[in-house]
Amino acid sequence: MALPATLDEAVDALAAEPAAVPVAGGTDLMAAVNGGLLRPTALVGLGRVAELRGWEYRDGHALLGACLTHARMGRPDFAALMPGLAAAARTAGPPQIMNAGTLGGNIISGSPTGDTLPVLAALEASLVIAGPGGARRDVPVSDLLVGREQLSPGELLAYARVPLLHAPQTFLKATGRTGPGRAVASVCVALDPAHREVRCAVGAIAPVPLRPLEAEQWISSLVDWDGARTVHPEALTAFGDYVAMTCIPDPEPDPGTGEIAALSPGLIHLRRTVAALARRALGRALS
Ligand SMILES: Cc1cc2nc3c(=O)[nH]c(=O)nc-3n(C[C@H](O)[C@H](O)[C@H](O)COP(=O)(O)OP(=O)(O)OC[C@H]3O[C@@H](n4cnc5c(N)ncnc54)[C@H](O)[C@@H]3O)c2cc1C
């Protein structure tokens, strides 16, 4: 396994061995290897690339290194900067997973239940991709998640570029009955006072995070941005329902009869869960 010490060395190592697979914390990769889904012939370990393990500020944004671990993102100094990501990182699996698992691995794995993904979607983060010869390109996180953009051979995810909004952000996650674990549904709410916007993304209920844009616009128009930044409690409930109905809509009418089939009990329950998460997430962000 190659163990480069800098980002450019890591890119060079990948370019030199096109079949090599990058590995950060290995939590997803090793699960795939152990499950027989992946047989990498060579690995490029990213654990020694110091520049990918921290963050820096640039032009009103934070550049978050791809090898930031969930444990590191959960600490108070990071939470003061990125409260939504910190809250998501604190729920991303048991402690040994949080100590090893990274932001970049979470993004590249792109699992529907990846906890950082709805936060990055709500914050409209972009990704800095590093390629051979010092090349860098920016890709919206949503484009990578839906497959409009992909990493080319020899490229690495280097940083997530996340706007600094200097306002409350919340992340809430519902898990199955067995307790802590993968999300059944998750919601991130981020306030953007400079643009008088409430941003929201719902995770885990679809292959990629969903943005309920009309619900965002509606609630943004009700927030008293120059005052206490509150809304009427009934508006919180209505927001939760609006988000849930947008993300889990009623079935389309039957083209022949015009009848609308009933939503399955499972989806009714999921809709209630999303509504409750969105209501609470907004309530906490505004409180
Ligand atoms: C028991 C268990 C519980 C878990 N619970 C949760 C949970 O609750 N929430 C959650 O979100 N996740 C959970 N996970 C998933 C996992 O921990 C995260 O997705 C983690 O963030 C992956 O990061 P990693 O560094 O371990 O990635 P790795 O396993 O090292 O890599 C994952 C993939 O990303 C690629 N990759 C990694 N870094 C880069 C890079 N910089 N550039 C290009 N490609 C890269 C690798 O080649 C690989 O394909 C769990 C996993 C386990 C095993």
Image (cartoon, rainbow, N blue to C red):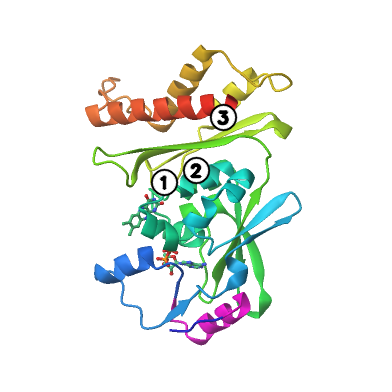
Give the vertical position of 165 relative to 105 (above or below). Answer: above
Judging by the rendered image, the residue that carries numbered circle 1 is 91
Query: Any magenta on residue 135?
Result: no
Q: Quadrant of ligand 1?
A: bottom left
Which residue is located at x 64 percent, y 20 percent? 223
Which residue is located at x 64 percent, y 46 percent? 81
Res. 285 mark: 3
Mark 1 lies within 8 Å of ligand 1 (Cβ measured): yes
Res. 101 mark: none
Which residue is located at x 59 percent, y 50 percent? 78
Q: How dense is the environment of label 3, judged by Cα within 10 Å: few (below 14), some, or many (20 and up)?
A: some
x, y (%) of residue 165? 68, 40
Res. 87 mark: 2
Q: How dense is the environment of label 1, judged by Cα within 10 Å: few (below 14), some, or many (20 and up)?
A: many
Q: Viewer-proximal residue, 142 or 182?
A: 182
Give the vertical position of 25 relative to 258 (above or below). Answer: below
Asked whether the residues under the numbered discs 2 and 1 touch, taking CB atoms below 8 Å apart as contact, a structural biologist would say: yes
Q: Amino acid at mark 3?
A: Ala
> Residues in magenta?
5-21
**Rendering quarter of residue 252:** top left
Q: Earlier in the sequence, mark 2 or mark 3?
A: 2
Q: Amino acid at mark 1?
A: Thr
Give the vertical position of 281 relative to 122 (above or below). Answer: above
**Is residue 69 shown to the viewer in this render?**
yes
